[in-house]
């Protein structure tokens, strides 16, 4: 099982971090040990003093394939969920300044907080609203119609380089509004108006 993540896939988020808007998908990976499931708490790691939340719609791959063609891309995911791409922003900034890979800032243990999955047929796939609240206050809002690279395009693009396998997850990018967490915070993620992600910071 692979956790494939897409960076800077909403223009406003790229701008808020003073990053260029990409001309093709920016891909990075998290290992399976990054997964945090079943509403378990996220324990603030000792290696960072600036962990940020990034809420994303996540695709669950339902069949194997490589070099997926455009007309078949939508058949490779039947369920979607919400995930938090927890990011050690202080470490990431140091790595970016040196031109080094991001893995220790993005792929540390439990850095991929994941909700349950729901059938995509329950949603209007032309534009899915989602948002994150922190301690009861909305901090991120997004609509998948604003993606730079659509779900289907991501399937095509990723499958050029990595064989997609059943159970793989694709984090599709975060909208503007990312920010820091602290011990005691309570994060709640909503897909449309349904709360499906619950995470307490300890």
Image (spheres, helix red, strand yellow):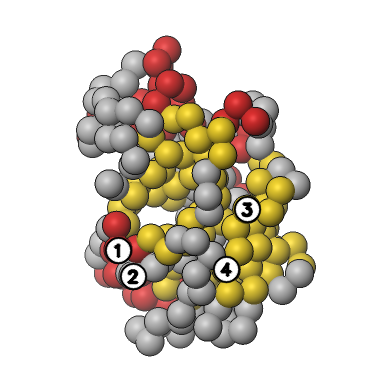
Label 1 – label 2 distance at C-alpha: 6 Å
Residue underneath mark 3: 196
Mark 3 to mark 4 CA distance (whole Å): 10 Å
Label whose residue precedes the other's in the sequence (1 or 3): 1
Q: Can residue 24 be seen at all in this image of the molecule?
A: no
Tag 4–tag 2 contact (CB < 8 Å): no
* Circle 4 crowding by C-alpha within 10 Å: few under 14, some 14–19, many from 20: many
Residue under label 4, please give it. Answer: 199
Q: Based on the displayed image, in which of its 4 quarters is residue 134 positioned?
A: bottom right
Question: Of 125 and 106, which appears nearest the observer?
Answer: 125
Mark sitting earlier along the chain (2/3): 2
Q: Earlier in the sequence, mark 4 or mark 1?
A: 1
For this view, does 53 lie left or right of residue 124? Answer: left
Please state the horizontal and vertical placement of residue 100, each as a whole percent of the image: 25, 65
The image quadrant that residue 64 belongs to is: top left
Where is residue 190 drawn, in percent x and y? 67, 52
On the image, the x and y values in percent for residue 88 come to 42, 73
- Residue 170 versus residue 149 in the image, above or below: below
Q: Are the residues tagged 1 and 2 within 8 Å (C-beta)?
A: yes
User: Along the line of sight, which residue is nearer the eye, 81 or 22?
Assistant: 81
Q: x and y percent of residue 54 in the render?
A: 54, 60
Q: Which residue is mark 1?
A: 33
59 vs 37: above or below: above
User: Around disc 2, counting alpha carbons within 10 Å, would you say few (fewer than 14), some (14 to 19), or many (20 or more)?
Assistant: some
Q: CA distance from mark 4 to mark 1?
A: 17 Å
Determine which residue is flagged by label 2: 109
At 35% across and 63% down in the image, what residue appears? 34
- At 40% from the left and 82% from the top, the residue drawn is 45
SS category of the residue bearing label 3:
strand
> How many labels sit on residues?
4
Q: Give the residue furthest to the front.
A: 38
Element carrying mark 1:
helix
């Amino acid at each position: 099982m692979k956790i494939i993540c897409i960076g800077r896939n909403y223009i406003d988020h790229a701008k808020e971090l003073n990053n260029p808007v990409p001309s093709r998908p920016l891909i990075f990976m998290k290992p399976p040990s990054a997964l945090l499931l079943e509403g378990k708490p996220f324990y603030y790691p000792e290696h960072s003093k600036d962990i940020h939340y990034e809420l994303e719609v996540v695709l669950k791959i339902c069949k194997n394939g490589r070099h997926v063609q455009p007309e078949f891309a939508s058949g490779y995911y039947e369920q979607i969920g919400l995930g938090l791409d927890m990011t050690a922003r202080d470490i990431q900034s140091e790595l970016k300044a040196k031109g080094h890979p991001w893995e220790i800032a993005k792929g540390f243990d439990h850095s991929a907080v994941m909700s349950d999955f729901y059938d995509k047929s329950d949603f209007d796939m032309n534009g899915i609203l989602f948002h994150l609240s922190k301690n009861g206050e909305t901090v991120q809002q997004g609509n998948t119609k604003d993606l730079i690279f659509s779900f289907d395009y991501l399937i095509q693009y990723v499958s050029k380089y990595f064989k997609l396998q059943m159970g793989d997850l694709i984090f599709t990018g975060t909208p503007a509004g990312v920010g820091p967490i602290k011990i005691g915070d309570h994060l709640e993620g909503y897909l449309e108006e349904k709360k499906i992600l619950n995470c307490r910071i300890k």
